[in-house]
Amino acid sequence: MPIGYQERPLVPLDVGDRAILRPDQLSGILAALRGRGYTLLGPTVRDAAIIYAEIAGADDLPVGWTDVQSPGSYRLAARPDGAFFGYSVGPHSWKATFHRPEITLWQAERQGDGGFTIHEPAPETSRVALIGVRACELAAIRIQDRVLLDGPFADPHYAARRRDVFVVAVNCTEPGDTCFCASMGTGPGVESGFDLALTEFVTDTEHLFLAEIGSGAGAEVLAEWPVDRATHGQIAAAAARTQAAAQRMGRSVDTRDVKEVLARNLENPRWEETAARCLGCTNCTQVCPTCFCTAVHDLTDLSGRTATRVRQWDSCFDRSFSYVHGGSVRRSGMSRYRQWLTHKMSFWADEFGSLGCVGCGRCITWCPKGIDITAEIAAIRAADPS
Amino acid sequence: MTPARTDPWVPEPISIKRIARESADTATLVLDTSERPGGFAFKPGQFNMLYAFGIGEVPISISGDPSDTGELVHTIRVVGKVTEALTGMAPGSTLGLRGPFGTHWPLEEARGRDVLIVAGGLGLVPLRPAIYEILKNRSAYKRVNIVYGARTPQDILFSNEISEWRGRLDVSLRVTVDSAGSDWFGHVGVVTSLVKLARFDPEATVAMVCGPEIMMRFAVRELETQGIADERIYLSTERNLQCGVGLCGHCQHGNVFVCKDGPVFRYDRLAPFFSKREV
Ligand SMILES: Cc1cc2nc3c(=O)[nH]c(=O)nc-3n(C[C@H](O)[C@H](O)[C@H](O)COP(=O)(O)OP(=O)(O)OC[C@H]3O[C@@H](n4cnc5c(N)ncnc54)[C@H](O)[C@@H]3O)c2cc1C
Ligand code: SF4
Ligand code: SF4
């Protein structure tokens, strides 16, 4: 059923209000964001995947593309309807924007007297507008904020990059086969943490977006356009699309007492069975939007006068991750797979007040062996002796 | 206690005042903190991250007297490249310092109670500042027992101080070694066997334990057998640790971060996974 577009006189819109936009108006809004000095980061097709990169405007979006995902498999497919956001999530997450894969922490310079001085590069700041952020990804950003900003020490590099961000979120209407955000309580609808949130409607006869205003900055950007205020019927239609997506979701996790079930099953034989399939390739930790671990490396130039410390993403699947002199604590693949899953779905809650998984499904899709975190949890639960 | 710098990733250069050999593979470094605003204040049990130029950075407990803020004392055993570089440095040279980080021994809670200190090998290092504090305020504590195990008589750390403490009437100190020649007249055997000999009231004892993980497992079992509740047993644990400030994720041990929730833990916090393999 068409939801209809009708231009009305300019009315001031406020936080919480909803408007109806045509694709050309959405393009205009993206241009307006650039005009305000934001670098646009959004989904775009590259290397046969939908990834996040700098985009010039709406033309760079994956218009008319979708993705087909299953454990260990990801394919792009054309869709005839020209949808802008007709896919779920790809291998990239916004983690790479705020928590960079590699940074230089500082450089030290030898002095004549045998001492040294240390220079710290000013943390890089940026003014970015994220386009097309899903609910699960907003949840992941909130989780990383808690880890990297809210502890006894904040990471100044992450803080600098998080400071000036405009978020154009998208309510999911197209869940993937590996998604399970509905069961994690993190999606598919966005509830907070955005400046604008879009719901896309695309049929043979119309292509419209319902835009919800989440902040003063969002209202300001929208105020530049003569947009149509959404009717109750349109708002209900948008909500229905997101609800339908929740129903269609491929997978789910029973989160009731999952924290306790995993914590009391550290010796469950299932860990060994799964570890026998796991390659230890670290894909799952690289694609996960909440995995935050890093390693530092000390480098020196050839003269030995300048020493640099760099920080890179690390993975608990790496044997050296838990190295103490004499050998690694987690020597077996079993213990490393168990560490990853129990951290996400149990210990994280004690450490940071929520589970560390948002149900985006990336680790399932990008695991070359198709190991499925939802199936693993179900198996442990089924084998739980108590 | 916040470090002097605002960026927790960045060390400050600090110079070495003195360096003394403790044993064949262990040395004590005294760093000059007299020029530092406020000197260097810390609590017994805390650690610093020490950086050897161009080589790397490692967590090292503070082994000196907390009441002396003009110098900072670290005792380091050579096991690899960074510890070798740190102990091989000459007085006057510079290393990088971040800290102090982590939790401390429960000296407040131990007031008015018996204290039982159980150290294995290098585990004596983070306990020494606690011993200094306790001896300085000796009347605040009831019976003080120290049991210490080393590999051989030559590996006994701080031997001058050990003799001094042994000479005190208000401290009961027992030392054992794993193996020794015929010139050793002391105990031979594991440190947990000395716990049985110590006299304390299990209902009113605070135990502080540090040593290799396997030794701590046995020690905890023995302390429990002696009737000390898990809530009054404290351990200092060790994990790979790269940032020291709860950001890098390396030191996770079950549901705790060794760097920010520890390294000193009340045992009941670790109990659910401490004896589990490879957690
Ligand atoms: C809280 C805490 C306090 C400590 N206090 C002391 C002390 O007072 N005196 C002392 O001699 N030792 C102490 N250690 C152990 C000391 O940190 C290691 O012996 C040291 O890191 C080994 O580094 P290396 O380069 O010489 O050895 P290698 O075996 O060459 O290690 C290579 C690298 O692995 C990492 N690594 C190895 N072992 C450890 C470890 N145990 N913890 C963290 N990272 C490690 C380091 O990044 C190191 O550079 C402490 C460890 C912790 C966690
Ligand atoms: S654990 Fe898997 S499903 Fe959960 S947030 Fe990470 S990548 Fe997504
Ligand atoms: S992606 Fe799959 S195979 Fe690779 S480390 Fe993760 S679970 Fe193992």
Image: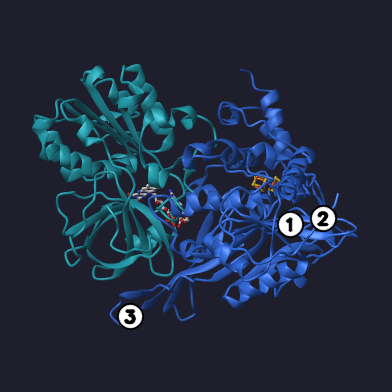
- The CA distance from mark 2 to mark 1 is 8 Å
Q: Please give the residue where the numbered disc 3 appears in the rendered image.
A: A111
Do badges 2 and 3 share one subunit? yes
Question: Is there a contact, CB below 8 Å, between mark 2 and mark 1?
Answer: yes
Q: Please give the residue where the numbered disc 1 appears in the rendered image.
A: A90
Give the residue type at disc 3.
Answer: Gln
Give the residue type at disc 2.
Answer: Asp
Identify the chain drawn in cyan: B
Residue A364, numbered label: none
Question: Is there a contact, CB below 8 Å, between mark 2 and mark 3?
Answer: no
Question: Callout 1 environment at 10 Å: few (<14), some (14 to 19), or many (20+)?
Answer: many
Q: Please give the residue where the numbered disc 2 appears in the rendered image.
A: A67
Give the residue type at disc 1.
Answer: Gly
Q: Nearer the viewer, residue B78 or A199?
A: A199
On screen, residue B46 above or below B267: below
Looking at the image, is mark 2 or mark 3 earlier in the sequence?
2
Query: On the image, which quarter does residue A370 sit in?
Result: top right
